[in-house]
Image (cartoon, rainbow, N blue to C red):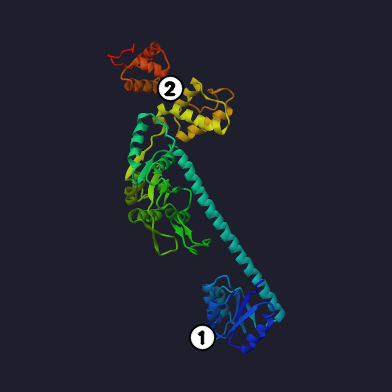
Amino acid sequence: MKRHGLLIVDDEKEILRSLTLTFADEYEVFTASSGTEALEILKQQSVALVIADQRMPEMTGAELLEKVFQINANIIRMILTGYTDTASLIQAINKGHIYQYITKPWERQELRVIVKRALESYELALENQRLLAELQAANERLKDENIFLRNEVCRELQCADIIGQSPVMQKVFGLLNRVLNNSITVLLTGETGTGKTLLACYIHHHGPRREKLFIEQNCGTLPETLLESELFGHKRGAFTGAIQDRKGLFEIADGGTLFLDEVSEMSPALQVKVLQVLQQGRFRRVGENEFRQADVRIIAATNKDLRAEIQKDRFRSDLYYRINVFPIHIPPLRDRISDIPLLAQHCLNKYRRKLNSQVTGFSQEALQGLCNYDYPGNVRELENLIERALILSTGPQIEADEWLPALPVNTGGVTRMEQLERAEIERLLERYQGNLALVAKELGVSRTTLWRRLKDYRVQPDKDSDVSK
């Protein structure tokens, strides 16, 4: 086992000789008669502990140990003093971060014990640093693996259609198609649970950067200092715990897409730094002066009204104009009730595989109950309802039961199911140009039933419609 290096610094040769004899049998001892000579030795030799006399010409022990601390904070630092000099000791302890001071004359065996314990502390500190570095490296690998896995999930989603046949969703799809073949900055707005993350992932994996990384960061989950480090990275020693250089998400996502969810939650100071990346394509790691380049497509999302946030001085107007290049608003589920049956069946198919369930559909009452609800949690809440219903269901289809949420009171005597059916009939009439036979076939009802519903809903078909076709 390699012996630790001890550096003894004193302008008195007799003290150097005495301390060398004390420690030479256990450690590799280096001696210096001045602070300047000691610093030269430190450049060339591996030293674990320095013992320096306080009173030396040119450079005091406190001044030397302060420089030692700057060179390598891990080195154990001790100071020798032959008299009571309170001011010098305080200076040495405060600036040089002294492990212990030793008064002259010392007891040889006691000094050996002190040095041994100090070096045990040195070894423990090095071991802790090694373990911390390994832990941080493992966390970095885990983070990279999580990013990879999230991208694999998103790659699976790119082959799946985003569900929706309602007019408002058709408008959203039309806007999506406009941004798929370019790298324009997109701002997704909408209530919580409307599917902003899914759309961001869809845009990336159908766009020109699909072969690069898609990385998501929720700006509301971390405090400002940690979020800054997460986005831009940091330099070793930039703050407590920063034991090695670390890349930020802008560097990791270079060439790909960075999805900034809940972008309104960023502090104004951090908004300035994100704005700089958008304007100039460059940034600095925390604790670093060097600028780095990043070619990243930004997709931002928020459930807040950013214009209102600007009025309240919580969001910068210049950043808003930078991210609001191509806004897409995702409507709440209550504004697209005709999509609920499609979404419900999609969720059913998704969770029946997960839960190994034999349920294949919904009763008319259950579907009507789903269509009558307002969904403050939007599509995410619908998914949760379907998963719960599958767990509670005992038959071949989901029945209306206690899993249904409390329904709002209907107004005007028209249920959401009736609104849904009327909207579907009107859509099919337009699709088949008023051919009632084809509409009835598509709906799975007789033409007599269709006529009755047209009368109930006061829908006037085209007079030229040929019900016999």
Q: Position of residue 127 (x, y in %)?
A: 62, 64
Residue located beneath label 2 in the image: 417
Q: Which mark is residue 420?
A: none
What is the crowding at mark 2: few (fewer than 14 residues within 10 Å), some, or many (at least 20)? many
Q: CA distance from mark 1 to mark 2?
A: 92 Å
Of 332 and 277, nearer the camera is 277
- Identified at 53% across, 77% down, the residue is 43
Q: Is residue 22 left or right of residue 93?
A: right
Q: Position of residue 391 (x, y in %)?
A: 58, 30
Q: In the rendered view, tell whether residue 259 sits above or below residue 361.
A: below
Q: Which three-letter amino acid code belongs to the residue tagged 1?
A: Glu
User: Which quadrant of the structure image shows residue 20?
Assistant: bottom right
- Identified at 46% across, 60% down, the residue is 234
Residue located beneath label 1 in the image: 58
Dot 2: what SS?
helix
User: Which quadrant of the structure image shows residue 136?
Assistant: bottom right
Q: Position of residue 8 (x, y in %)?
A: 61, 81
What is the crowding at mark 1: few (fewer than 14 residues within 10 Å), some, or many (at least 20)? few
Q: Position of residue 359 (x, y in %)?
A: 55, 25
Q: In the rendered view, tell whether residue 215 sits above or below residue 117.
A: above
Of 329 and 412, nearer the camera is 329
Dot 1: what SS?
loop
User: Which quadrant of the structure image shows residue 16?
Assistant: bottom right
Screen quadrant of the N terminus: bottom right
Q: In the rendered view, tell whether residue 333 sits above or below residue 454.
A: below
Screen quadrant of the C terminus: top left
Q: Which three-letter amino acid code belongs to the residue tagged 2?
A: Met
Q: In the rendered view, tell whether residue 142 sits above or below residue 174.
A: below
Furthest toward the front, the residue is 211
Q: Is residue 15 left or right of residue 437?
A: right
Upstream in sequence: badge 1 or badge 2: 1
